[in-house]
Image: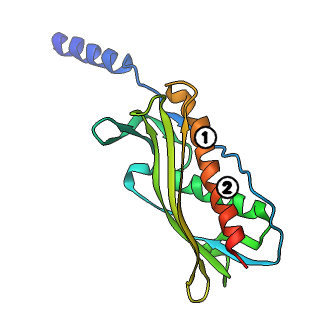
Amino acid sequence: MRYMAIMMCLCAAGCLSRNETPIVRYVLEPPIVVAQAPGDGPSLALRALRVSNAYRESVAIYKPGQVLANSSTTKWAEPPAAAMGRALADALTATGRFSDVGAAEAILQPGLVLTGELRKFHLDKTASPWTAVCEARLELRTGGDYEVVWSGTLSAAKPLATDSMDALPMAMSSAVGDVASQAANAMAAAVK
């Protein structure tokens, strides 16, 4: 009995002294730079971007041998597809070209609908220096017959200031901002 009590105390002490690595959550703050294109444009509804399971919440890391792994200690504060969607909404609104920009479920009869897929959203450790990579395939279609108004695959790759995970949020924010700004400028120019 005494042996069991000693073992239980040792097990409890071991469990309590275990060093747990805290999870770090990175926030994205993409800079938006767009040309002003004021006009009496249509309303624009944004559908949620499709995304691979690899780009859900944990930071995805591209490694040698075409390996895409997820970090167990670093995550995004919000899912990458949601962050990209928010950046697109901010950029499209900033152009001044559209009468309304919002989520598809919030706009009853939109003049335009934006759909797409977030194709890449990872830290490329095969590059030197390490690089934040963002790529999205986007399609802007009319709200009634879904005719294509504009479509494109846009990407940005931004080197990290240092080969450190702590430099990732700034580089990825810049990459997301570039993709959203390019898309908004192209869409604003395509709308008659």
Q: Is residue 179 left or right of residue 65?
A: right
Q: Amino acid at mark 2?
A: Ser
Does the CB distance between marks 1 and 2 fall below 8 Å? no
Q: Which mark is residue 95?
A: none
Image vertical order of residue 74 relative to residue 40, above or below: above
Q: Residue at x 78, y 58 (%)?
A: 35
Image vertical order of residue 2 relative to residue 55, above or below: above
Q: Is residue 37 visible?
A: yes
Image vertical order of residue 20 relative to residue 112, above or below: above
Mark 1 vs mark 2, foreground winner is 2
The residue tagged 1 is 27
Query: Regarding mark 1 in the picture, which secondary structure is present there?
Result: loop
Q: Position of residue 27 (x, y in %)?
A: 60, 40
> How many labels sit on residues?
2
Label 1, label 2: how many angstroms apart (C-alpha)?
19 Å
Protein image colouring: rainbow
Query: Regarding mark 2 in the picture, which secondary structure is present there?
Result: helix
- Asked whether 4 or 164 is in front, the reply is 164
Q: Mark 2 or mark 1, which is nearer the start of the sequence?
A: 1
Give neighbour class at mark 1: few <14, some 14-19, many 20+ (Cα, 10 Å).
Answer: some
Q: Position of residue 24 (x, y in %)?
A: 51, 32
Image vertical order of residue 175 relative to residue 44, above or below: above
Q: In which quadrant of the rendered view does residue 63 lie?
A: top left
Which residue appears farthest toward the bottom when viewing the image? 145
Quarter in which the C terminus is drawn: bottom right
Q: Residue at x 70, y 62 (%)?
A: 185
Q: Is residue 87 visible?
A: no
Q: Position of residue 135 (x, y in %)?
A: 50, 53
The residue tagged 2 is 181
